[in-house]
Image (spheres, rainbow, N blue to C red):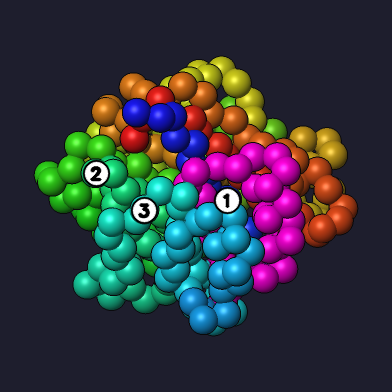
Amino acid sequence: MKPVTIATFNVNSIRSRVELIARWLEEKNPVDILCLQELKCEAEQFPHEPFEKLGYHLAINGEKRYNGVAVCSKLPIDRVKTVFDNDVLDRQKRLIEVEIQGAVILNVYAPHGESDENDPKHFYKMAFYDLLTDYVKALMQTYTKVIVLGDMNIALEEIDVYDPKVFEGRVGFLESEKAKLRALLNTGLHDCFRRKYPEKKAFTWWDYRTAGIWRDEGMRIDYIMATDALTEVCESIEVDLWTRRRRSPTPSDHAPLVGRLSSL
């Protein structure tokens, strides 16, 4: 079987970023499976043509102005799921599940939450993670090859932020949030990047407002997590900075995380 490259990328508006992404795919990194978050458009407004020209099949769960996730795959998509029969998981368009060659890929755009742990946004993030974890547990009863990836909006360890003191008490680095992400990993998933690089500092998000990309002042909040069967065949995983270290076309505040599997 051929190697497969898979990427997760929060694009922060697909219509604003389509030229950049198309150039990246065509000139720099023609990944086989590209999972996108924060589309900020409904499926009808998604720019299908540039991706289809490059040979991608599309599965989209879009939402007007906010959220939204999609999977672009050069491999045939055998099954798509966009409704999860739960008010918390379906309240906003934050999940899409596809099956490709017997492997299940669950693309997640987790809620941002709020640093005030009494805020409704924080409660929503906690509830979302609890139900996502339950869902992944159930998924693993049927499938051995599972990938859960996306913008998880949590940096798990001190090594995952440029300065832990700066992020102390801030949303995305709260102990309550970290506990939820650890619970998700404890279902039987592995953080592929940290598994490959136990001590490497690398980030996937940098604040626009502080020009943090140029000083590498960021957070690692985007993940590719996988069950044993797929973690074992993960040959490499890297943050591709090409799309982020640009002034034109305008970049997202995230960079794609790209993994290479010897097979799916």
Q: Residue at point 21% right, 53% down?
A: 134
Q: Quadrant of the C terminus?
A: top left
How far across and down, in percent of the image, does residue 166 sit? 70, 41
Q: How many marks?
A: 3
Q: Farthest residue toward the right?
A: 247
Q: Residues within 10 Å of mark 1 (few under 14, many from 20)?
A: many
How far across and down, in percent of the image, does residue 73 sit? 46, 52
Q: Does the magenta portion include 246? A: no
Earlier residue among tags 2 and 3: 3
Q: Residue at point 16% right, 50% down?
A: 138
**In the rendered image, which residue does mark 3 sit on?**
76
C-alpha distance separating marks 2 and 3: 11 Å
For residue 102, which numbered disc appears in the image? 2
**In the rendered image, which residue does mark 1 sit on?**
9
The amino acid type found where label 2 is placed reads: Gly
Q: Nearer the viewer, mark 2 or mark 1?
A: 2
Give the residues in magenta. Answer: 14-41
User: Pointer 2 and pointer 1: residues touching (CB < 8 Å)?
Assistant: no
Q: Residues within 10 Å of mark 3 (few under 14, many from 20)?
A: few
Q: Nearer the viewer, mark 2 or mark 3?
A: 3
Earlier residue among tags 3 and 1: 1
Q: Residue at point 29% right, 52% down?
A: 99
Query: Element type at marker 2?
Result: loop
Above-or-below relation of 260 to 123: above
Earlier residue among tags 2 and 1: 1
For residue 45, which numbered disc appears in the image? none
The amino acid type found where label 1 is placed reads: Phe
Query: Element type at marker 3?
Result: loop
Q: Residue at point 42% right, 64% down?
A: 59
How far across and down, in percent of the image, does residue 41 sit? 56, 77
